[in-house]
Image (cartoon, rainbow, N blue to C red):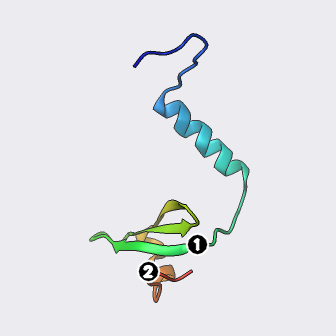
């Protein structure tokens, strides 16, 4: 890939660090969205998506908190 003069590319690690810091700066937040593509792995972790209008967030509930997902099904908000 060619870069134009003035471009200042960053590494994947730099992008991840910047994103992590920005999200952490928000503090505790509550996110509302539609649950979709819920999947429980063999080690007990729950993977799912929270969908909004035209976007989605990929999420994980670790096995030690799996009880939170009891009764939660795709399509719920």
Observer-nearest of 44 and 2: 2
Q: Secondary structure at mark 2?
A: loop
Q: Residue furthest left?
A: 42
Q: Position of residue 61 (x, y in %)?
A: 47, 69
Q: Write the residue at 38% across / 69% down.
A: 45
Q: Identify which residue, 61 or 1, lies in the foreground.
A: 1
Above or below residue 54? Residue 37 is below
Q: Nearer the viewer, residue 66 or 16?
A: 16
Disc ID at residue 33: 1
Q: Position of residue 11 (x, y in %)?
A: 49, 27
Q: Quadrant of the C terminus?
A: bottom right
Residue 40: % across, % down: 34, 74
41 vs 3: above or below: below
- Residue depicted at x 67% and y 50%: 24
Q: Identify the element where label 1 is drawn.
A: loop
Q: Quadrant of residue 32?
A: bottom right
- 44 displayed left or right of 31: left
Is residue 65 depicted above or below 54 in this figure?
below
Q: Residues within 10 Å of mark 1 (few under 14, many from 20)?
A: some
- 8 or 18, which lies in front? 8
Residue lying at 65% horizontally and 43% vertically, measured from the top left: 21
The Cα–Cα distance between marks 1 and 2, rounded to whole angstroms, is: 11 Å
Label 2 crowd bin: few (<14), some (14–19), many (20+), radius 10 Å: some
First in sequence, mark 1 or 2: give its number. Answer: 1
- Residue 34 coordinates in the image, percent (x, y): 53, 75
CB under 8 Å between discs 1 and 2: no
Residue 73 - label? none
Q: Which residue is mark 2?
A: 74
Placement of 24 over or under 70, stated as above or below: above
The residue depicted at 61 percent of the width and 37 percent of the height is 18
Q: Residue furthest top?
A: 5
């Amino acid at each position: 890939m060619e870069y134009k003069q003035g471009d200042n590319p960053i590494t994947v690690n730099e992008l991840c660090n910047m994103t992590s810091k920005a999200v952490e700066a928000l503090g505790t937040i509550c996110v509302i969205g539609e649950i979709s593509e819920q999947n429980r792995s063999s080690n007990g972790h729950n993977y799912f998506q929270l969908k909004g209008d035209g976007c989605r967030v990929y999420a994980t509930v670790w096995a030690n908190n799996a009880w939170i997902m009891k009764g939660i099904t795709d399509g719920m908000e």
